[in-house]
Amino acid sequence: MAKYKAYPEYKDSGVEGVGEIPEHWKMSKVRYCFSFDKGLTITKENLQDEGIPCLNYGEIHSKYGFEFNPSIHPLKCVDKKYLNDNIKSLICKGDIIFADTSEDIIGSGNFSQLVSEVITFAGYHTIISRPINRESYRYLAYMLDSQELRSQIQTSVKGVKVFSISQAILRGLSLWLPRVNEQKNISTFLDYHTAKIDKLVEKQLQLIELLKEKRQAVISHAVTKGLNPDVPMKDSGVEWLGNIPEHWMLKRAKFIFRKMQRPISKHAGIITAFRDGHVTLRQNKRTDGFTFAIKEIGYQGVLKGDLVIHAMDGFAGAIGVSDSNGKCSPVCSVCIPYEKTLIYTYYYGYLVRQLAVTNFIQSLSKGIRERSTEFRFNEFAELSLPIPNYEEQMFIFKHIKKKEENIEELLQKQLQQIELLKERRTALISAAVTGKIDLRDWTPPASSSEESLTTEEATA
């Protein structure tokens, strides 16, 4: 921020966390700058693929934070009949749509602003905020996205497991307003610079996807083809396997693994099979977001080294080798090899999970609920699996682990860059909308080649 000058005079805003604002800016309240309406009173069952686009609170939280354009951002729709009696739930360009509930305090105040003229509805669990002065709509969006405004919301919301905001909470928020021409300059400045930052974030996300694809390709090739590119191959006769090394054997899973029903040891912690392939004590990953059973009916013991297949989430990758002793739900199949001197379970953790990430499990299983299919041990038991010799299984596992560690290191670097970029974006918005930098004379560069931004510069 050092290259931007400050305003010549400041005054106390009187708002905790905001501090001083430029002397000529005026204090106001949201109630004087917005009118309010509610989104449609509908449920997921009312959504369809065609009709009038409808923004619901889920998209605000997970997909289209800050702004959205139905022309380029896919949305579920509602039937055109809703146009007859729900005009107040239609939104216009510049309207700001808040999600009225959040699962955490940080998400309280999440919103998205419509930036196109496409006829659109606000959907369930939303609050529509309409700028009274339409010339100010972009500046107001940035102000509502600033940490200073969000802090006001987060100290006002109510809830324990779910945090809710209301029109009353929003109406009571304090705002600080420069003149309209200053507002336009500030929003133009932020549009320009946040677009560059967002573009860098998108590049980092693309790199992350490429790294994930590379990781999966390494695993897939190693567990099905081995590590020696010169070894003679043979047709496995199994569609999902294709050619395998000539010296590998094939057996159905029921002749390799048996399903266990272990007793539960005293004080055993709960083991969870996560969709990222980690099978570990729940407390090792996270301790919230779960519904704990009052009675643990049918729970079974798990030992470190057991292969665990989650029947409902296995299709999404919830398959792996437990790294701890504990107990797990009866929805999981706990498996051990018949011959531990021939079967290295950690190799098979990768191999069986490969069936999930290639959607093979999903093709075998029956859907039972949204984002879930049922894959029980009896289906797994009939699958033909390759059997390299024991030493080769170990080498393959160690090879994959080393490659994964290298890729994970690169992934973490990209994620750190993204966090730094987001911090830069947040700081820039706060500095601009609280008047810490004077942008009255700022003009966009004459050409797009000027002021080009690299990740290093943006995060410096």
Image (spheres, helix red, strand yellow):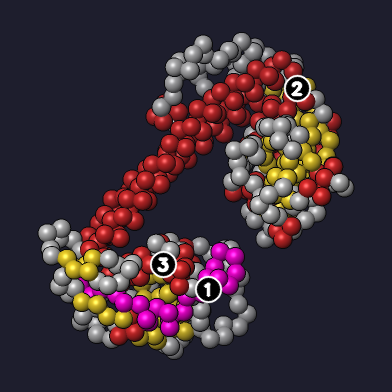
Q: Amino acid at mark 3?
A: Phe
Provide residue 309's location: percent of width, then percent of height: 42, 74
Provide residue 105's location: percent of width, then percent of height: 65, 51
The residue indicated by pointer 1 is 366
380 lies above or below 160 = below
Q: Left or right of 362: which side holds 45?
A: right
Q: Element under label 2?
A: helix
Q: Amino acid at mark 2?
A: Glu
The residue indicated by pointer 2 is 135
- Contact (CB < 8 A) between labels 1 and 3? no
Q: Amino acid at mark 1?
A: Lys
Q: Residue at x 82, y 29 (%)?
A: 132
Q: Is residue 58 magenta?
A: no
The residue indicated by pointer 3 is 360
Bounds of the magenta span?
367-388
Q: Nearer the viewer, mark 1 or mark 2?
A: 1
Badge 2, how many Cα within 10 Å: few under 14, some, many 20+?
some
The quarter of the picture where the C terminus appears is top left
- Contact (CB < 8 A) between labels 1 and 2? no
Q: Quadrant of residue 45?
A: bottom right
Q: Element under label 1?
A: strand
94 lies above or below 372 = above
